[in-house]
């Protein structure tokens, strides 16, 4: 843990985390919404489930941004 903290304090570690943070946020949100394991089989069905989650995320983000603008 101490080695990880040292890496994250370095400039390189900060730049890596900065690029990685948006994806981690989305993954955490999807897990909170119950996407831990796919209940469908096949690439097309899995991609469909992911697209539904992405659409829900985008709709909620749009509502949040509209509320902030008002």
Image: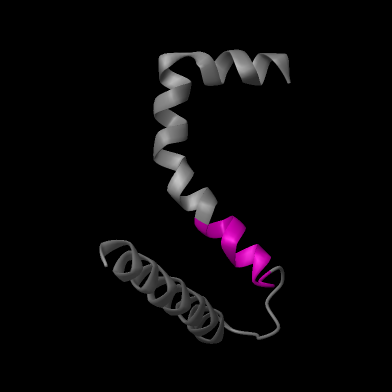
65 vs 55, left or right, is: left
Which residue sits at x=26%, y=63%? 69
Q: Main SS of the magenta segment? A: helix
Quarter of the picture containing the N terminus is: top right
Magenta stretch, residue numbers:
26-35
Q: Is residue 17 left or right of residue 64?
A: right
Residue 25 picture location, percent across and down: 52, 52
Q: Residue at coordinates 69% horizontally, 72% vertically from top-left?
A: 34
Residue 4, image x, y percentages: 64, 21
Q: Name the residue nearer the viewer: 45 or 7.
A: 7
x and y, in percent, of residue 47 in the image: 49, 79
Q: Which residue is at 47% across, 78% downward?
A: 56
Identify the residue at horizontal 46%, vertical 41% (top origin).
20
Q: Between 68 and 46, which is closer to the camera in this rendering? A: 68
When the figure is inspected, residue 1 is found, relative to residue 42, above or below; the finding is above
Task: Name the quadrant of the C terminus.
Answer: bottom left
Query: Can you name the residue that lies furthest to the left here?
Result: 69
Q: Quadrant of residue 5?
A: top right
Q: Is residue 34 magenta?
A: yes
Q: Taking 7 as reference, is 60 above or below it?
A: below
* Residue 22 belongs to the span the image colors magenta: no
In screen coordinates, is 23 left or right of 68?
right
User: 29 or 17: which is nearer to us?
Assistant: 29
- Quarter of the view holding residue 16: top left
């Amino acid at each position: 843990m101490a080695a990880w903290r040292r890496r994250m304090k370095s400039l390189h570690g900060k730049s890596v985390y900065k690029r990685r943070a948006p994806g981690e946020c989305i993954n955490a949100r999807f897990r909170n919404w119950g996407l831990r394991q796919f209940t469908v089989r096949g690439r097309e069905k899995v991609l469909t489930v992911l697209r539904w989650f992405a659409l829900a995320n985008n709709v909620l983000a749009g509502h949040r941004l509209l509320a902030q603008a008002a």
